[in-house]
Each structure stands twice: as structure tokens, then as C-alpha cells.
Amino acid sequence: MFRLPPSHIHAVLRSAELVSDLNSNKGRMLSLAYQVRDAFGDARVSSSGVQIIPVLEYITNKPPSQPTQVQLAECGSFSATTGIGDCTVEVATSLFPAAGSASAFANVKLMAMFASSGGGIESTTAEIQLTPPPTHPPLLEIGVLGTSPIRPLRPGEAFVVSVEASTGSVALKEWFLPVFYDSAALSFVDTTQSQLWNPLILTDEMRDMRGGEQTSAQLEVVAVSPIGMLAVASRAEVFNTAVLDGVNQTSTISATIISSWHETSNASPQSPRCGKLIGLCLAPNGDDAFMIEPASEGCTVTVAASHTVGVRQIAVVVEDGNLTASLPITVWFPQSLELVVADPVLNRIMPSEDVQQGCTQYQYQGTSVTARAAWGGEGLDTIESTDVTSLVAFESSSPNIVKVTGAQLQGLQGEGSAVISTLAPGSVNVTNDQVCVISMDAVAYTGVVFSQNPSSDISRYQPQTFSFTVNQVLVKEASKAGVRVYATFSDGQITDVTSDSQIISTNPEYLTLPSTQLVGVFGQVAAALGSPGLCAPILQATWSVCGIALGQGNGVVSIQLPGPVVVNKLSALPTSITRAGDPAAASPIQYKTVTTLE
């Protein structure tokens, strides 16, 4: 699938304050959720050569040693289906002001950098606070020092309280360290002790977010809460083909709720609040282009035959509680429809006096019809001449004159005319003027060879042209080739007459055909030993209508079998024989006198 590069990036900042903690880097983790989209609003963008990088730009209290703008470590990759990614990177302590100083403020943004062009795009900025640790007096005398987190903690989060001790010149053989905590708010997990410690009985000082000397630690616990929401559509662009075939087109919109803590998984909306339309999605001014219906975890944009306009990137808003997210939906509408009849005049192909009584075969030419649409809408460029034949149903105003089967038209009787219609008209005339078959061709085909191999990575916005050559070479015994027969008439029209043609091989030693002739009959090659190659017109087709041959033609078949190199397996049945006239050949022994080698 072809994917465009990102042209839009939206970021949700999880926490607006980073804290340079005393014994953990968790407070220094900058975390954002982000989403990328291409120029058409599709979240399925190319990730090739794309780097997502967070950038800090100081506003106040910049550390003297740092530049005004700092690039941080590269973010994690984004989803190939939703365009949503996570960016959680550590901010070095050197980027914070010195301990005890005032906090620094900075703008943070995400940049998507493209390796191919050296350019990039960037998100809007969000302001963050870089809080340094408070100052504490050093532990110089005999005592014990405990250090607790100074950053806000989240419910359920495990944290470390580190303990240091100084005994000066005093050596103690055993020690006792009581630790007290509020069991209603905290639960004990585990301890880790250095092998260098001697037990101490003395309890002295704690370090926490308040700074200075404390005898107990104060912790701040904040709830993890929804902080933002990102939405994605299964189809950012919807073509209103419902006006052609009556089948509604849909795009499913889902949302992801972003939490305020990067260690908490994102979630889906649990209690969506409906908006002014039917579902939880609001689409101002979108009534004429599509309707919105509620779904289990989002909503569905539905484009129906009753909708009458196309529109470029109309905003759909998803709501859940106080959270909102918007995304663009583009609807393409058929601005015009044209029917193209390959041969608007269908002639008689044989004299009426030659038609045998009771003949049910067609005695007039047939042709095909193609429907082409131009797509567009408000704010959209026009996509010209798109084949929509498979989406429409054709009808004949005079089915006794022109028969319609899918996109095939067949003249039944003349003189007369018929209007072929769907949402646009086209006319066909049937005349008794006779045309003659001036040539016939039988074509054996084994595949096609492209001038360059088509890639699955083809742009849906940039047309590409490929050239190919029909392959007509049989390269192994029993390999098959499809056969089609074409008649060229005196009015210049070429018609596939395979179903009414008799196909034979003029050289069965090299080419055989199935006993039952089918539409798209397969020929089968069988090469004689010692004659592995042939290129000759050994395929012959005769087209008859009502028992009268209207034309005959030949087709070239190329057989290029490699010569034998080795016999991998040779078996004989029976495995024992005797010479003719040997008594062993008679009853009751009855040895065979010949064997078959395979």
C-alpha cells in the first residue's frame, strides 16, 4: 500500500511539570502522546526515513551552559494503522536549573524530520516547568539521612526511600533503624542493604520536597487522570459510490484516551457523551455530505445515496466527558457521469436468407459499454474520467432490439435503436446493413511480461503507466496456454468470438487441446522426444453462426522445451520379462515378454 509522508503532527503533553528528583529519573521523563496524518487526513502514513524528535525551547531561567533550543532523544515509532505513537524520553539533570533555584519554563514541541529531504514538520508547542531539587544541608556529623521522592507520585506506584549514614570515627558492631509510615496510605514492598553498613541505632534527618532538615518525609500523591484524546478514521477519504450502486459507504471513527502518566496504558472511551447530532461525533455543516451514527467505541460516518455533495476535510469532533478530539473527513462526489459505447452501430453479420430456421445464435454484432465518472466537491480538485462500470447497472429502453448483460450489449434485430441508461444515457443503433469478417486471430497466451514490475506501493493520488508484452511461450511438457479468438469486421470493430469458435491443433504431435471446448479454452503442449522446439501457426480457429462459417484464422504457438539433462527416476512394469517362445511365458508361470518403462 502506498503511503504519503506525514504532513501534520499533533501532540498531547501528559505532564506539564518535570522534577529533578533526588534518587530517581522518573520525575525527569518528558512524555507525550502524538499522532501523525498525511495531507489528506489519513493516519496511515509512511514511516520510512521519518524521525520524531522532541525539542525544548527555554522561556525563563535557562541554565547558563545550555543553548536556548535543545533536541532530546528520538521518540518511539508510531502505529502503521492509527498514526499514534508514544514519546517518553529522559531530560538530563543538566537541563534543569541548579538545586534550590527557581524553576525554568520552556516550550516543548515534536518535530517530524525527513531523512530524504532534510525538512520536517512540527506540532504546536506546550509549556512545561522544569523544577530543580531543593537544597539540603550536607551530612557531616554522625547521623542517618533518609531521602524520599520530591516529585508527585501516582497511586499504585512503587518508589524508593534511600538511607545514608555517617558514624564519624565511631565504629559500631550492630545497629537498629526503625522506619515508620502511614499504612493507610502506603504499603511496604522490600529493602536493599549495602554490605558496608554497620547497624546504627540513631535516627536523625529526612530529605523531602520541602528542603532543609526534616525528621519525617512528606509525599505528594496525585491521581492519574485522562489528559487528552486522539481519534482515527478507518477511511479519511470516502467516495460516494452509493449514488451509483445504492450501497452505503462508511468510515469507522474510534478514539484513544491519553492518561496523565506514561506508565498507565491508554484506554478507549467508556461513557461517550453524544453531541448535537445522533452520535458522539459532531460534524458542523456535514449534513449534505454524510451522516453520523453511534458505534460501540466511537461513531460511524455513513455516506448514502441521499447525500448530494462532496467536501474537503470537514472536521468531525469526538467527545468523551470533557475530552475532545477532531479529525478530517473528505467526501468525494461524482460530479458527472458519462456512458461510452464502444460500437454505437451494430450491424448484421450474416445474410438473413442464410439463417436456418430455429437458429438461436446472435446474428448481429455485440459491443460493450463503459461508465466514467468525474469526482470532486467543495474545495477539491476534480478527478477526471474514472471507470465506474462495475458500480452501475445498465438498462435498455428496447430490450427486444438491444440486450444488456452486465456491461455487454448485443444486437437482436434491426432496424431499430435503444437508449442504454443508468444515471446517464447512451444510444445504440441496430441496422440490417451487413458487415464481413475480414480477418480472424487465435491468440495463445501464457502470461504477461511487464516493462517494469508493478509495485504494491502505488500512489492513489499520482497515476502511473505500465507497459507489458503478452507472453506466448510454452516452456515445459503439459504446460498450458489460454486461447482467445478475435474477429475483425469490415467496419473496423474487433469482437471476441471465442465462445462460438471451434479451436483445433493442426499439429497434434506438438499441441493438443481438451476434448471439451470451453470459453477461454486451454491448449496443452506435448513435445515429442528429440523435437523440443517449435514456433509455428499450428493453432486454428473457425467461427460459425447458425452452421455457417463466417471466418477462419490461425495463431502462432511457440514451444521452447529444454533438452533432457538427466533421468531422475526410471521404473519398469512388470519388472520381470522373458523372451518370446520361452516356456516360462506359458501357463502356469506366464511371464510377460514386454515391459513398460516410465
Image (cartoon, rainbow, N blue to C red):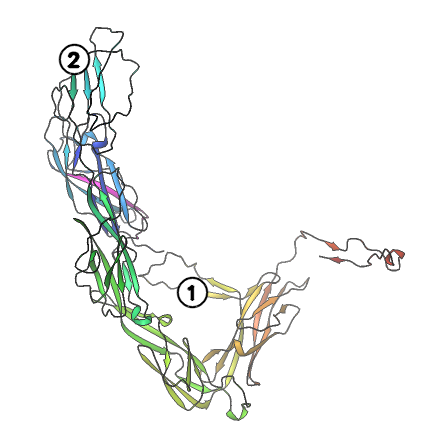
Q: Is residue 273 magenta?
A: no
394 on left or right of 330? right
Q: Position of residue 424 (x, y in %)?
A: 31, 78
Which residue is identified by label 1? 467
Alpha carbon distance from label 1 to label 2? 84 Å
Query: Which label belongs to residue 18?
Result: none
Q: Which mark is residue 140?
A: 2
| 457 shown above or below 13 | below
Residue 233's quadrant in the figure? bottom left
What residue range appears in magenta? 40-57
Q: Estimate the x, y position of residue 467 in percent, counting from the top left.
A: 42, 65
> Where is residue 564 shown, x and y percent of the image?
66, 56
Q: Residue furthest bottom?
A: 353
| Res 91 seen here | no
Q: Amino acid at mark 1?
A: Ser
> Which marked residue is nearer to the observer: mark 1 or mark 2?
2
| 198 to 71, vertically: above or below | above
Q: Nearer the viewer, residue 153 or 26?
A: 153
Residue 260 visible, this orientation: yes
- Which residue type does callout 2 highlight? Leu
